Image (cartoon, rainbow, N blue to C red):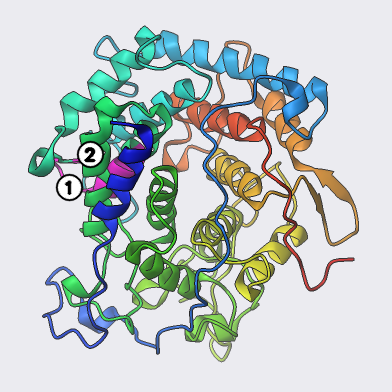
Amino acid sequence: MSVFSVVMLLQVAAASPLPPQDSTLPLDERIDRSKVTEQPPPVVASVSARPPSVVRRVSLAAAEVPCAASSWHAARASINQGLEFLRARQDAGGGWRVWKGSAGTDQRDRSLAASTAITALALKAFAQVGELPMNSPTAARARDSIRSRVGGTGRAFNPDPQGGLGNYVASAIASALASIQDPEDRVLLRSSVEWLTMHQWDQTEGVSPRMDWFGGAGYGRSGRPDLSNTQMMLDALHDAGVSADDPAVRRALVFLTRTQNLAETNAAPWASGGSRDGGFVYTPANGGESFASEAAGEGRFGEKIAVGQPRSLRSYGSMTYAGFKSMLYAGLSKDDPRVQAAFEWIRRHWTFRENPGLGAQGHFYYLHAVSRALHAAQQHTITDVQGSAHNWRDELIAALLSMQASDGSWVNSASRWDEGDSELCTIYAVLALEEAIKPAQEAAPVNSPAAP
């Protein structure tokens, strides 16, 4: 079966019809109805723009990338060093961070399935430079490890037997297998996409489009949805070739709109009471929460804001790039006000030195999201609000090279979200560098209403 046929199979598999808005199915028992807020569904523009195409390999020559040739060569060398570090750290069974469990936000138990997701992300990092299971023992062992852990067909597919990290694992697997483009993986790839679309919160769990959970993805469906999991799901669907017109993507766009600090399109009270700055928060579910609000001393839910002041939530870097990228993957035009507002936030908070709003926390996750988002934006130079022009590839490459250790690894001094682990940070860093030196797509500048 051809690669094209595999993609077509995925599109058909994911294209489940959208249930009617007035669904009378009972609300899923895992949802606390008293915490769910409701607003009219946001007006979502029709998906008419062409999403950025999927680019699965890094460039073979500096001339294919709009950055300095010296940056391209330095990035290639840095990627190779990072991959050699990862190669040396691969477990005999083919995985990374084996027996090191992780717990998602608000999940009580740590899950060993985190290693499956990290192994899939590492596999993608090797595949994007041309190291595939058919020509690389490292990649072959990684794929075999993934196959052995999750099952390969139909009902056998189980991304996390412990239940907590299913969306994270299924998303990473889908992106990794899509990067390999091997027909032998078509069943497992299709199973991962089907799992993701089936486990999105929607009317099949009694969640109406009026509810703040609608369209989002969360940690294994055992908790409320969030933008981090939803953007990983959309990354996977995009990488696998699922159409932006697919119902799952359309539902996710409703969730994305509700996660943005933009009162013109988001009716949530917290979006009206705050900065309205176009950035994104962690989740709108259960009334909304933001880790940047927590870092600012206002409480993750805005519960510590002074009495008499309107409740609001703070936008921050990693979620804003995640939301911006996800809207482009969902087919929103560069002229859509949601895209323009997110881009304006990016221009106001331009930096690679930290995760704006959180400092060092989640820094490497942030850099990976930045790289994917700016490659998707098809804009080679970003002009900040002070009028300074930035070749984002040159600057991102320089920033990552300055943080790389002599053994080829990266690690964050802030250990939150497992970034004290050198294997995870190295995977994020290599993937970010690979996005930066993928062949550039045709430039289609994102407009900003405040552009100089």
Residue 7 is drawn in which quadrant? top left
Q: In the depicted view, which residue is nearer to us: 246 or 266?
A: 246
Q: Do labels 1 and 2 touch, CB within 8 Å?
A: yes
Element marked by disc 2? loop
Numbered range of the magenta stretch: 159-172
User: In screen coordinates, is 379 left or right of 434?
Assistant: right
Which quadrant of the figure contains the N terminus? top left
- In three-dimensional space, the C-alpha distance between marks 1 and 2, rounded to whole angstroms, equals 8 Å
Find residue 153 and report its horizontal and vertical position in percent: 13, 36
Under mark 2, the amino acid is Ser
Residue 103 in sight in this render: no
Residue at 24%, 69% (x, y): give it: 17
Residue 187 sits in which quadrant?
top left
Q: Which mark is residue 270?
A: none
Q: Which residue is mark 1?
A: 163
> Residue at position x 46%, y 62% from top?
282
Q: Is residue 174 above or below residue 411?
A: below
Q: In the displayed structure, would residue 369 be above or below residue 85? A: below
- Nearest the viewer among 29 and 414 is 29
Residue 388 visible to the viewer: yes
Q: Position of residue 111 (x, y in %)?
A: 22, 39
Helix, strand or loop status at disc 1: loop
Q: Quadrant of the C terminus?
A: bottom right
Is 433 on the left-hand or right-hand side of 283?
right
Residue at 65% from the left image edge and 54% from the top image edge: 356
**Is 223 located above or below residue 284 in the figure?**
above
Label drawn at residue 111: 2
Of the two numbered discs 1 and 2 on the same chain, state the one appearing first in sequence. Answer: 2
- Of 180 and 269, which appears nearest the observer? 180
User: What's the residue type where badge 1 is placed?
Assistant: Gly
> Quick one: label 2, few (<14), some, or many (20+) residues within 10 Å?
many
